[in-house]
């Protein structure tokens, strides 16, 4: 038995799979986390790109937005894992879902290893613009892959 087959047979996975209410509730919670993440990513990275709140202090804007992203992750990761458990065998081999997980890992590493450093230390306008563009692409990519997977199932 693979780990995804085992996960799909756990009590919690069966409960989520068998309950429309539980799946719908988790999906709503998952989307709340997604909204916080993409909202925070939009504000923070459009500020880095100079397209939003350009006259406001960079650290003040990006620090608040980073908190939104962190809270969003605390909401969307556990709810996502529960939703995943109910369809673990199909999702784990789905190319779009795999791309989403790859983008999520890249976005989280980039956010905490590069983005936060550039915002704190300010390595110049070019570094800010490149960081903003990369981070925005990664976070929007995660949300787009999530929506694509659930809407088209591909
Ligand atoms: C470890 C983290 C995550 C896992 C395991 C995960 C898993 C899933 C699963 C299994 C679904 C299908 C839901 C269903 O069956 O109804 C889904 C949907 C979705 N996910 Fe995630 N997800 C994670 C993180 C995220 C993050 C960080 C975002 C956004 C930035 C996101 C955005 C979405 C969107 C937009 C959908 C479609 C709407 C929905 O049904 O809720 N996910 N996710």
Image (spheres, rainbow, N blue to C red):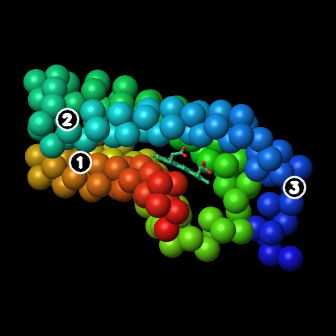
Q: Where does label 3 land, which residue?
A: 10
What whole-number distance in Å separates the C-alpha atoms at marks 3 and 2? 44 Å
Q: Secondary structure at mark 2?
A: helix
What whole-number distance in Å separates the C-alpha atoms at marks 1 and 3? 41 Å
Q: Where does label 2 land, which residue?
A: 47
Residue 130 located left or right of residue 112: left
Residue labelled 3 has its Cβ within 8 Å of some atom of ligand 1: no
Q: Position of residue 46 (x, y in %)?
A: 20, 39
Residue 128 to residue 2: above or below: above
For label 2, the crowd category at 10 Å Cα-Cα, with few meaning under 14, some 14 to 19 and many 20 or more, is many
Quadrant position of the N terminus in the picture: bottom right
What whole-number distance in Å separates the C-alpha atoms at marks 1 and 2? 8 Å
Q: Is residue 98 visible?
A: yes
Q: Nearer the viewer, residue 78 or 47?
A: 78
Q: Where does label 1 land, which residue?
A: 132
For label 1, the crowd category at 10 Å Cα-Cα, with few meaning under 14, some 14 to 19 and many 20 or more, is many
Could you say which disc has been placed on residue 67 in the image?
none
Give the foreground label among 1 and 3.
Answer: 3
Q: Is residue 74 visible?
A: no
Q: Position of residue 148 (x, y in %)?
A: 43, 57
Marks 1,2: beta carbons within 8 A: yes
Number of marks in the rendered image: 3
Residue 150 to residue 60: above or below: below
Q: Position of residue 123 (x, y in %)?
A: 19, 48
Residue displayed at 56% across by 71% down: 94
Give the foreground label among 3 and 2.
Answer: 3
Residue 86 located left or right of residue 80: right
Sequence-first disc among 3 and 2: 3
């Amino acid at each position: 038995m693979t780990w995804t087959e085992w996960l799909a047979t756990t009590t919690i996975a069966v409960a989520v799979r068998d309950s429309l209410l539980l799946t719908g509730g988790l999906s709503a919670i998952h989307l709340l986390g997604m909204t916080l993440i993409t909202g925070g990513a939009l504000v923070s990275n459009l500020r880095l790109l100079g397209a939003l709140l350009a006259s406001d202090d960079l650290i003040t804007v990006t620090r608040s937005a980073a908190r939104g992203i962190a809270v969003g992750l605390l909401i969307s990761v556990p709810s996502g894992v529960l939703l995943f458990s109910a369809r673990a065998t199909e999702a784990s081999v789905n190319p779009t879902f795999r791309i989403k997980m790859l983008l999520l890992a890249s976005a989280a590493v980039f956010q905490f290893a590069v983005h936060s450093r550039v915002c704190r230390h300010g390595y110049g306008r070019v570094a800010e613009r490149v960081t903003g563009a990369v981070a925005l692409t990664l976070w929007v990519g995660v949300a787009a892959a999530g929506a694509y997977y659930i809407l088209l199932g591909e």
